Every structure is written in C-alpha cells, then in structure tokens.
Image (cartoon, rainbow, N blue to C red):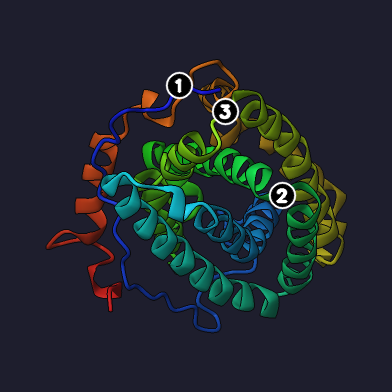
Amino acid sequence: MTALRKVIPQRDVRTRRIGFNYPDGGFNRHYVSGDLVMSHIVSMLSATFPEGEDFFVRSVRHYSEQITDPELKKQVAGFIGQEVTHGREHRALNERLQAMGYPTRFVDGFVKKGLQREERLFGPAYCLAVTSALEHYTATLAEKLLTSEKAQALLGTNEVRSMLLWHALEESEHKAVAFDVFQTAVGDEKLRVRAMRVTTVTFLFAVTMHTIHSLARDKAARNPVRLLKSVAALRHSPFVERDVITKLRAYNKPGFHPDDNDNSELIAYWSAQLFGEQGTLADHLK
C-alpha cells in the first residue's frame, strides 16, 4: 500500500473557458516545421485525446465520492473541467486534421473501443491506475514543451502551437490530481507500477501503429528520401531526450509522487505568458 498523504497541497486547477479557430488554409499539411513524421505523430496523439480525456474523467469521477479532503475535492472538480475542455478542443482540431487527410476519426473510434474494453475487463481501480500513468506521460511531455525552445520552435506560430501550449500548461497544473485520487481511494503500489509498465508498452505501440497508418495515406511519405530523413530526425527530437526518459521512468520508483518535480515556477511563468494582462491567449478566453 502507498503511504497516503496527510495533507493535500493547494493547487490552482482552474477551468478556463477557451476556444481556438482553425480556418481552411490556416496552416500547412505538415505543420510541425514541415517535418513529415512529426506532423503525423502530433496528429495521431491529438486523435487519441478526446476519448482519452473522457476515460480520465470517468476513472477519477468513479472515486470522487470517496474523496473527503476539501482541497482534493476542489482539485478533482478543476481536473474534470479541464479535461472536458481538452477533449472538446482536440475534437475541433481533429476535424480540421481529418479534412487535411489525417485519419483522426478512425483513431478516435479505435481508442474509444479499446478504452471501453479496458473498463469492462479490468475494473475501476486499474483504470484509475492507467489514468495516473498516462497523466504522468502527458505532464512530462508538457513540461518539455514548456521548457524547451527547440520543442516550441517545432510548432511555429500557428493556432496548433497556441492550443498545445494551453494544453501543456493545464496538464502541468493538474499533474498530481489523478495520482492523489489513486493514493487516497486505492493505494496499491504494485498496481500503480504494473499499470505504468503495461501502459508504456500499449501506448507507444498504439501511437506507432497509428502513425504508420497515417503516413501510409500521405503521398509525401512515398518519397523515400524525405521519409527516411524524417525518421532519422526523430532521434534528435527534444521529446526523446534523456531528461524526458528519466522523468518517465521515475514513476516506477517506490514512494514516487508527481510533486517530487516542483513545477510551480513554470506554471506561474506560463500562466502570465498566456493569460496575463498581455497574455498571448487572453483573447481566446470566452
């Protein structure tokens, strides 16, 4: 059993009413700096988010009545609000990506069936453990995006960049909520680590296969020189750097907690950058 936290620290997990616009011709087909493979990877990740966010909400909400700590209850409400908004905005982006030729609807349906099967076969405790594991993945990748100029440069200046920066900020804000719900309601350390190991294999395999499927539909991928150069460039991606791998693996250590990595200054900086008086996304708020 995991040692339960006696005090849940205060976190500002707010639900922002926000919207993004993706007009026709608003960005190029290969919008990640013209990179063929990375454009497909980002698109396929986006395609998994709507059903994934719904799964996270269901997994956490299942245990919400067992949460008595008022601070954690407040954070759970913020977590649910943020995740619902993420799902809605990624659905809008995914429709635009579908129109551009990415198979986002197919992936959406595939993910929905897979997660429903997981809920039916393995039950709520395992689903909450999977949610906590995937939240660690998204928070780690979010932190890399928010701290790496190289990662930010990949996304240029289009509306996708704006949406992903907002999403990354909110993933950083609520990175410990599902974990704390798991600790409080389940508290099974072996289940937590086992779910992370299984999720690592299934998540990476699914993203890889969806990316291959998406590339197979893209005429640009039939140029072997461009395709091979793009695949080779993956090893230099900021998202596979050693610090990312180290943070992901830290989840499996006994006594791990997401707050071991203090991101409060990062959150404060990006909150001001995006939503302060002169914030670049202040005009996106409804």
Residue at screen point 80% across, 58% down: 117
In this figure, which residue is indicated by the disc labeled 2? Answer: 123
Chain-order first, disc 3 or disc 2: 2
**Residue 283: numbered disc:** none
Residue at screen point 57% across, 28% down: 248
**Label 1 amino acid?**
Ala
10 Å neighbourhood of mark 1: few (<14), some, or many (≥20)? few
Question: What percent of the width, then of the height, locates residue 30?
Answer: 64, 62
Question: What percent of the width, then of the height, locates residue 269?
Answer: 22, 43
**Residue 248: numbered disc:** 3
Q: Judging from the image, what secondary structure is the residue with disc 1 in? A: loop
Q: CA distance from mark 2 to mark 1?
A: 23 Å
Question: In the rendered view, does 278 fall on the left or right side of 120?
Answer: left
Picture quarter with the C terminus: bottom left
Q: CA distance from mark 3 to mark 2?
A: 25 Å
Q: Find residue 50 and report its image quarter.
A: bottom right
Question: What percent of the width, then of the height, locates residue 180?
Answer: 43, 38
In this figure, which residue is indicated by the disc labeled 1? Answer: 3
Q: Judging from the image, what secondary structure is the residue with disc 3 in? A: helix
Q: CA distance from mark 1 to mark 3?
A: 21 Å
Residue furthest to the bottom: 24
**Label 3 amino acid?**
Leu
Chain-order first, disc 1 or disc 3: 1
**Label 2 amino acid?**
Gly
Q: Find residue 148 and report its image quarter.
A: top left
Q: Is residue 157 visible?
A: no
Question: In the rendered view, does 168 fall on the left or right side of 278?
Answer: right
